[in-house]
Image (cartoon, helix red, strand yellow):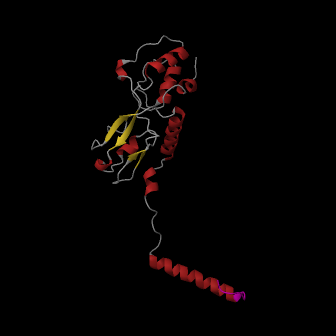
Amino acid sequence: MPTPNEIDALLPQTQCRRCGYPACRPYAEALAAGETTPNRCPPGGDELIARLSSLLGVPATPLDPEVGPPQAPQIARIVEAECIGCTLCLQACPVDAILGAPKRMHTVIEDECTGCGLCLPPCPVDCIVLLPAPAFPEASASRARFLRRQARLARGEDPRKRLRPAPIAASADQLKRALVAAALERARTARKNGGPSA
């Protein structure tokens, strides 16, 4: 029986959840355990069904209608003039392919977008559209982005914190006083040691 890694290596890594699993890896694990069928990946379509069926040693069957029609490669695009900066799409993207800040326009990193469509439902102003793409992104790169995002979420990091300026520790007046005091101390030390003041 093939391993989850062997099966996962064949999947397109869109992380679209249309198979009924939360990501491509859990679907691969379920296939390896014999808990599901290899005809539940719309982005992979008939070609993937044939490859998975061959690997698993089972007959190929048409795409399960429960998961919808085959999905051609696509990418998300944000109509930036309509974006209100709610950040809901950033939170929904499984591969962190959307950039933006609260109350600021967002944009999609097209080379990283898997076309999963998970950003569409949470958008309150429907400013995201899916457009045809020439091909799906390289699966290994998409898998790596997904795993980095999962690790970041497990650590509890919020990418929006990196977008905020660091708080100013002291007022400008306090900072000036500290700089003058440090300069005076350097001058006293230099005079005491017989050298020129720095």
x, y percentage for residue 47? 47, 19
Quadrant location of the N terminus in the rendered image:
top right
Above or below 78: residue 174: below
State whether the magenta stretch is mostly helix, strand or loop. Answer: loop
x, y percentage for residue 96? 45, 43
Q: Residue at x 51, y 46 (%)?
A: 155
x, y percentage for residue 161? 44, 55
Q: Residue at x 47, y 69 (%)?
A: 169
The segment highlighted magenta reads 192-198
Q: Residue furthest left?
A: 125
Q: Residue at x 41, y 40 (%)?
A: 93
x, y percentage for residue 48? 48, 21
Decide if residue 105 is on the left or right side of residue 111.
Answer: left
Let me know if residue 4 is in the magenta part. Answer: no
Residue 9 falls in image quadrant? top right
Above or below 88: residue 4: above
Q: Residue furthest top?
A: 59
Above or below 135: residue 123: below
Quadrant location of the C terminus in the rendered image:
bottom right
Let me know if residue 197 is in the magenta part. Answer: yes
